[in-house]
Amino acid sequence: MNCPIKEQTADGVPCGRCMFYLPDGKSCPRHGDVSDEVQLFMSERKLTMENVMRKRKGLPTFGDNE
């Protein structure tokens, strides 16, 4: 499966799905551990916004400097 993250530009605008393949089903070469997002995608077929994933990991989000 491919990464279930909906990527965002630096100003927070959605720009499409991450297309990296998850070789182990939970690790993206770009986004790291996305196992929580994989579970959501498998159960609800919904992508996760990149900022939501970044908040979960305690990382800075995009578009916050406005």
Image: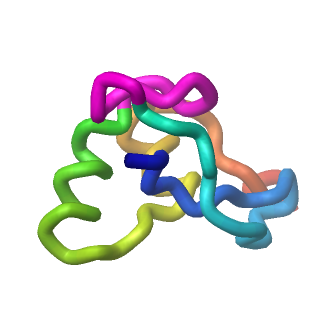
Location of residue 26 (image quadrant): top left
Report the span colored magenta.
23-33
Residue 16 percent location from the top left of the image: 70, 67
Residue 20 percent location from the top left of the image: 59, 39
Decide: is 4 above or below 44. Answer: above
In-image side of 64 versus 48 (left or right): right
Q: Residue at x 26, y 37 (%)?
A: 35
Location of residue 45 (image quadrant): bottom left
User: Nearest the camera: 34 or 24?
Assistant: 24
Location of residue 34 (image quadrant): top left
Check if residue 11 falls in the magenta segment.
Answer: no
Residue 51 percent location from the top left of the image: 56, 54
Total labels drawn: 0
In-image side of 63 versus 58 (left or right): right
Q: Residue at x 43, y 62 (%)?
A: 48
In-image side of 35 versus 14 (left or right): left
Q: Residue at x 62, y 50 (%)?
A: 19
Check if residue 32 falls in the magenta segment.
Answer: yes
Magenta stretch mostly in which secondary structure?
loop
Decide: is 11 above or below 10. Answer: below
Decide: is 64 above or below 59. Answer: below
Residue 24 percent location from the top left of the image: 30, 24
Q: Residue at x 45, y 31 (%)?
A: 58
In-image side of 27 versus 12 (left or right): left
Q: Quadrant of the C terminus?
A: bottom right
Q: Which colouring convention does the figure follow?
A: rainbow
